Amino acid sequence: MSSSQTRAIQNYRSRLSDRGLARFEVMGRDADRDLIRMLARRLAENGPESVKLRAALNDTINGEPPKKGGILAALRRSPLVGANLEISRQREEGREIDL
């Protein structure tokens, strides 16, 4: 590659970097090429729609974060709520063993 071509590529990547963008390569199915390009364009716009799209993708890929209080809610739904159970544990010294 000639020095002018190398310089042109460096200038192009520098301009991308100034705009907050980066060029990278991904591997995928040929049928998904247009979809991935459209997705990349929408995310690069960095507007309110891209924020929503980014959040939806993160939720879909990573799964939704667990909701707080899930165990407590399950315990409150238990049929034993209000049964006045007395749960106690016997305290023992343990067993004797020969060493």
Image (tube, rainbow, N blue to C red):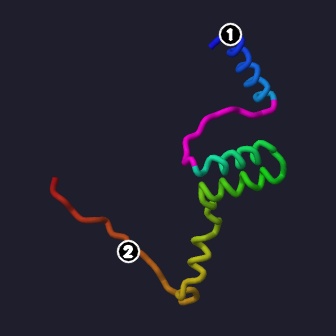
Above or below for 69 versus 97: below
Q: Is residue 94 left or right of residue 98?
A: right
Q: Which residue is mark 2?
A: 90
Q: Secondary structure at mark 1?
A: helix
What type is the residue that disc 1 sits on?
A: Ser
Which residue is at 31% across, 65% downward? 93
Q: Quadrant of the N terminus?
A: top right
Residue 83 located within the stretch drawn in magenta: no
User: Front-most of 21 and 59?
Assistant: 21
User: For residue 3, which numbered disc appears in the image?
Assistant: 1
Above or below for 12 versus 2: below
User: For residue 79, which numbered disc appears in the image?
Assistant: none
- In this view, the residue farthest toward the right is 47
Which residue is at 76% across, 48% downward? 42
Whole-percent x, y for residue 36 in the image:
65, 47
Q: What stretch of residues is rendered in magenta?
A: 19-30
Residue 45, quarter of the rendered image: top right
Whole-percent x, y for residue 78 in the image:
55, 84
